[in-house]
Image (cartoon, helix red, strand yellow):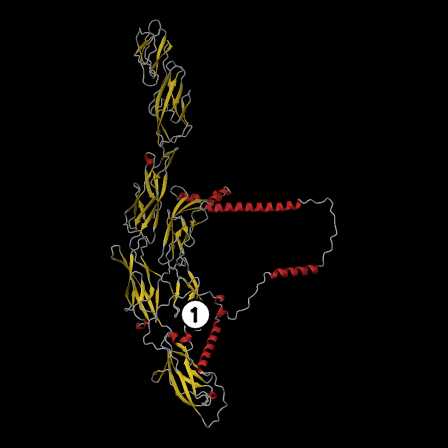
Amino acid sequence: MLRVPDKPEPTGGGVGVRGILWAAPQWGPSVHLGWGGGAPSCPVAGPDAGPRWCEAPSWCLGVLCLGVRLFCVLFPAQANFAPHFFDNGVGSTNGNMALFSLPEDTPVGSHVYTLNGTDPEGDSISYHISFDPSARSVFSVDPTFGNITLVEELDREMEDEIEAIISISDGLNLVAEKVVILVTDANDEAPRFIQEPYVALVPEDIPAGSIIFKVHAVDRDTGSGGSVTYFLQNLHSPFAVDRHSGVLRLQAGATLDYERSRTHYITVVAKDGGGRLHGADVVFSATTTVTVNVEDVQDMAPVFVGTPYYGYVYEDTLPGSEVLKVVAMDGDRGKPNRILYSLVNGSDGAFEINETSGAISITQSPAQLQREVYELHVQVTEMSPAGSPAAQATVPVTIRIVDLNNHPPTFYGESGPQNRFELSMNEHPPQGEILRGLKITVNDSDQGANAKFNLQLVGPRGIFRVVPQTVLNEAQVTVIVENSAAIDFEKSKVLTFKAVDPDTGPWGEVKYSIYGTGADLFLIHPSTGLIYTQPWASLDAEATARYNFYVKAEDMEGKYSVAEVFITLLDVNDHPPQFGKSVQKKTMVLGTPVKIEAIDEDAEEPNNLVDYSITHAEPANVFDINSHTGEIWLKNSIRSLDALHNITPGRDCLWSLEVQAKDRGSPSFSTTALLKIDITDAETLSRSPMTAFLIQTKDNPMKAVGVLAGTMATVVAITVLISTATFWRNKKSNKVLPVRRVLRKRPSPAPRTIRIEWLKSKSTKAATKFMLKEKPPNENCNNNSPESSLLPRAPALPPPPSVAPSTGAAQWTVPTVSGSLTPQPTQPPPKPKTVGSPVQSTLISELKQKFEKKSVHNKAYF
């Protein structure tokens, strides 16, 4: 800096100065003057030169130091004092910018300061401002008037101080000063949450008032604009937040339930303390979502699946066989405990249960069971990780003892079971006479419909008939004469008949088998026809709800009948409803609802029926929801955006709702999701068709892509059609035609009949190539060609379950009734008639006719 002494000291006849000269370590015009006389003329000092004196009789001396090189600069002898800035102090808007500060929201182009100074001689002065080459040129200055203008935006958070060099010059003297301009804060920053996303895992038994999580937001502003407070968007939430620390807690009296809702979404709002921005008071806020995942704890009893339980025991069931299986699961599905099964009562020692699998099996022979129905009570007990019993549940199980048709009718005489009955009678007894010498009782020890059977005499036809023909459990058997003339001593002295049940014995035995694409998971008992699942089979109603296969019933003679079996699985509610996304965004136009949808993968109603509800909203009286369709709309009282703004704290139209989807199964499952709704009106949509389309498809971008693709496809199709039509038109029009049309007489065509005959002949020859030649029918197709049958080949039968050896069971026998005839001399013998085939052939013939008649009635194929 150039400093001039207050008084120049004249020397000699003119004005002279005497100055001391030295080397300076850095650049900057520095002149130090001392007064005196007799100094030598001004030399050029070297790097190691000491102080030098210089004097001129008619010139004012100035010394310029650059590095270590010294220069002498001569000025006119008349003294010219340097200009200087006014120092007007703090708060001044003109002068030398001492302690000047500027708000960061000052608009670009604003006049912010005026440089002001003076020259002692009154010369005109100019102003300049410069910046470090590595810094921004934030200000510009009017060199004549000193007006400083802001030319770059300010940001206190990025740069809170600006260094500049201001200078004032009178044309000869230049005075420069370094100044620091302070940038003051404006409330132009919003709070910002850090370390997102926020996810908390909380056990469902956490006590009320416990800390769940802590959110943290920062605001880079200073003062009140940089202070942050927190609050929840939903005032009816079971959670609360400390407005100063951001600590989330479970409210007093509130509880969490993993089985009711596994996830909660908490919307936290961070708001600054407010401040000035562009002359107005503003408040900024930010929102974040805290996802609270509820951790399952053991607080639910076990639940049985597939109730009610029914089981059946048949007479041929072996001790140790499995009757049915009960299935239970821990009600706490997040961390299920191990469960054990036990029989509480009702079994009387006849049944036992596998404690780990839940399979109930019989311990005794069915013949030893004393009751027809057993009501068991099965208890399931959870075992804690420490091995101690925990929660329990009980379910009833009904087991019915089913009688099989495995006891043939037994014939009894006066002394007990009897296989042969004999009597003597006269020949030609009266028509309708009862053979009173026969005392026959028949009994079937089966129960219910299995005890019903038919009686039939097998022997010479039309001679006797048996009464009754149908028996239930037990009956007295009566034989009545039907054809007196056939009872002739001369023809046959002994008549032998069998009383039989045509549906029992070897002729009535039926073997069952299953086959088909759906039969892999099932087995059938070959004699009882009981269908059950394979031991390894795993059934899932959601994967396959219905199975069908074929059952074949075949008798001892190879005759069979086929039936189709359909098995439908009953659905169990084991899937909760699921939203497509945990956070959904929708755009709502005033007067038009938006729709949410959750899918339940259960197979049947009511397990897959979903009800919707709004669990949290702030304020709570803005939206309504249709619980069945999931449609959400504004209440009737809100008909404009202005009405919506009046109840919105931030006067915005973006809302966050927590919605719940709950199925109707038992037990019921539910899922929650966060729904963000952006509300607009029809006026905004009507500004342009493209704007309306984009807003409507904002929630579903694939819809916009689909519409665009469809439009392009339509344009391409129309272009192809037009091009094709143009091509064919040009092709026809490109033919070269003569100028003058010449008409020529066509030759007479051949007679039409000849051409028609030729076409018929040609078409007949061509048609013979495609005629199907039928093979001659094979009369023995059922016996010699089983592969050609309409029915598919049945798979190999599964090994039949072992049958308990019957102890003391009566073998099925057919009693024989014989009668010897005595002659009647008083009556002339009738004309001899052919008695017919022997008894054995008659029996086989009648049985064969019986089965043939039955097969035709059932439309069976063999």
Question: Pointer 1: residues within 10 angstroms few (<14), some, or many (20+)?
Answer: some
Tell whether 773 sits left or right of 265.
Answer: right
Q: Quadrant of the N terminus?
A: top left
The percent coordinates of residue 11 (x first, y second) are 33, 6
> Residue 577 appears at what percent x and percent y?
39, 53
Residue 17 position in % (x across, y down)? 33, 9
Q: Is residue 816 above or below residue 829?
A: above
Residue at the far top in the pictured view = 13
Q: Which amino acid type is marked by label 1?
A: Ala
Reading the image, the residue beneath label 1 is: 553
Query: Where does residue 357 sit, x and y in percent of width and height?
Result: 31, 61
Is any part of residue 105 visible from this angle?
Answer: yes
Q: Quadrant of residue 329?
A: bottom left
Q: Residue at x 61, y 61 (%)?
A: 767
- Please give the name of the residue rendered at 43% of the width and 71% of the height, measured from the top-left corner: 554
- Quick one: which residue is furthest to the front in this view? 784
Tell me the element at label 1: strand
616 is higher (above) or lower (below) than 282:
below
Q: Relative to residue 94, is residue 770 depicted above or below?
A: below
Viewer-nearest residue: 760 or 319: 760
